[in-house]
Amino acid sequence: MAADHDQFEDGVNDGDTISDGWYNGCYTEAQLIAMRGILDEGIGKNKVEETFTSDTASTKTNFTYDEGENAYYCKGNQTGTLITQTQWVDTYADVQRYGYLRWDYKVYEVYDEIDDSSWDTNLWDSNTTPTETNEYFHWTGAYYVGTDATNGDFYGTDDIVVIEVRVTAYDDVYGGSIEVWDGTNYVQVSGAIRNSNGIQTFTLKFDSTNDQVFVWKNGHKEGVYDLSSLTNNKWMIRINSDGTRNAHWYWYWCRKYKATPSTTVTEYLSSDDGTNFTTADSNGFVDITSSSERGIRMKAKLVANVASNEVIVVRRCDYMMWDENKK
C-alpha cells in the first residue's frame, strides 16, 4: 500500500492542476476528479465527511490523537484500529448495500519521535542541551536546535520532512524561525512562529535539482526558498531563537515521508453499526453481499499494521452508502 493515500494534498484546492508526483501520491489527476464526483453524489444523501477536528473516533486501538495536526497517529510495531462514530442514513432510506470510502493517511519514516526522554547526539545538534521529556524537546534563550550534520543532512535529496513545534512567550511577536542551514550559513524558511498559533506542523520538501525547498505550514503553502547560498553541501533543519521575550520552544517530533513503506492498511465499511465490516476493494468500493449484514447505521474502519521505524498519520475519512435500487 502506498504511503500517500489522500484525496486532497495539503495546500491543494479544488480546481488546482495536480500532476503526477508528490501532490497526488497514489492517484492520477483523473482518478482524483472521479473520486470527487463519486463523493459529491452523496451530498444531501448518505455522505459522511469525518475530518477529525477533535478526538471523535468511536474506537482507537493503538492510535493517539494529535491536536496539533487534527489527526490520529500509530507508531511502529503495532496494529492500530480506528472506527468512526455511527452515522444514520436518511430517514425512510432502505438498508444499505453498496459503499465507497477513502481514508486520508500518510506513512512516514521516523527520524525522532522525541518520546524517550533522551537527547540523542547522533540525531540532533544544538548550542545548548534541551530538556527532553517523553513528549518534546524544550529550551529557552538565544539557542538553536537542529538535525545532525551526518544523519539529518538532506543535501542532494528530494526528501519530504515534517516537524511539529510550538512556542510560548510574553507576547505574540518575537524572534525565532525555522531555517535550513549548512553549519555556517542559513536560509530562513518560515515567518516568526507565534505564541497565538499553538502547535504548528511544518512540511519541507527539498528539491535537489533546483537547490530549493518548498514549505507548508499546517497544510497551507508558505513559499519556495532558494538554497543556493548554502555552499557547504549540507542542508540541515533547525529552529533558531534570538532569545527575546522569554520565548519557550517545544519540538514534538521529526518525520520523513516514505514513498514505499512496509506498513499495510486495510479499509472497511459497515451499514449495521459495526457488527459486520466489509473490506473495500483497491478502488474504495464496497459490496455487502450478505443481506443479513445490511442496515441503516454506517461506520468506517481502518486497520494499520505499522512496520518498525514507521508511523502512520490519519487525517480524514470520507464515505457514502446507497441501497441496491440505486446502483
Image (cartoon, rainbow, N blue to C red):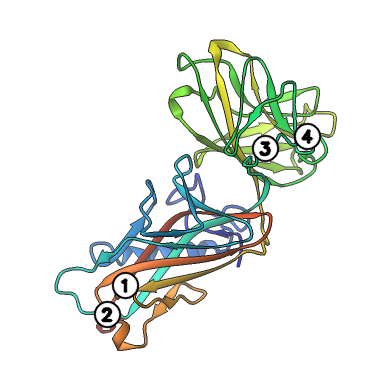
Q: Which residue is mark 2?
A: 323
Distance from disc 3 to disc 1, alpha carbons, whole Å, reads 41 Å
Q: Given the image, on which type of amino acid does mark 2 rest?
A: Asp
Q: Given the image, on which type of amino acid does mark 1 rest?
A: Met
Q: Is residue 135 positioned above or below 277 on the image?
A: above
For marks 3 and 1, give the one nearer the viewer.
Answer: 1
Distance from disc 4 to disc 3, alpha carbons, whole Å, reads 25 Å
Q: Is residue 324 left or right of residue 62?
A: left
Of marks 4 and 3, which one's residue comes earlier in the chain? 4
Question: Is disc 4 in contact with disc 1, using a CB cutoff of under 8 Å?
Answer: no
For marks 3 and 2, give the one nearer the viewer.
Answer: 2
- Secondary structure under tag 1 reads strand
* Residue occupying the point 58% across, 63% down: 26
Q: Position of residue 14 (x, y in %)?
A: 42, 51
Q: Would residue 117 be seen by someone viewing this image from the given angle?
A: yes
Q: Would residue 34 be seen by someone viewing this image from the given angle?
A: no
Question: Is disc 2 in contact with disc 4, using a CB cutoff of under 8 Å?
Answer: no
* Residue occupying the point 30% across, 71% down: 273
For marks 4 and 3, give the one nearer the viewer.
Answer: 4
Question: Is disc 2 in contact with disc 1, using a CB cutoff of under 8 Å?
Answer: no
Instruction: Identify the mark at residue 213; answer none if there is no mark.
Output: 3
Instruction: Identify the mark at residue 285; answer none if there is no mark.
Output: none
* Residue occupying the point 25% across, 84% down: 325
Distance from disc 3 to disc 2, alpha carbons, whole Å, reads 48 Å
Q: Position of residue 228 (x, y in %)?
A: 77, 31
Distance from disc 2 to disc 4, alpha carbons, whole Å, reads 58 Å
Q: Given the image, on which type of amino acid does mark 3 rest?
A: Val
Distance from disc 2 to disc 1, alpha carbons, whole Å, reads 7 Å
Q: Position of residue 206 (x, y in %)?
A: 70, 42
* Residue occupying the point 34% across, 78% down: 98
Q: Which residue is mark 1?
A: 321
Instruction: Identify the mark at residue 121; answer none if there is no mark.
Output: 4
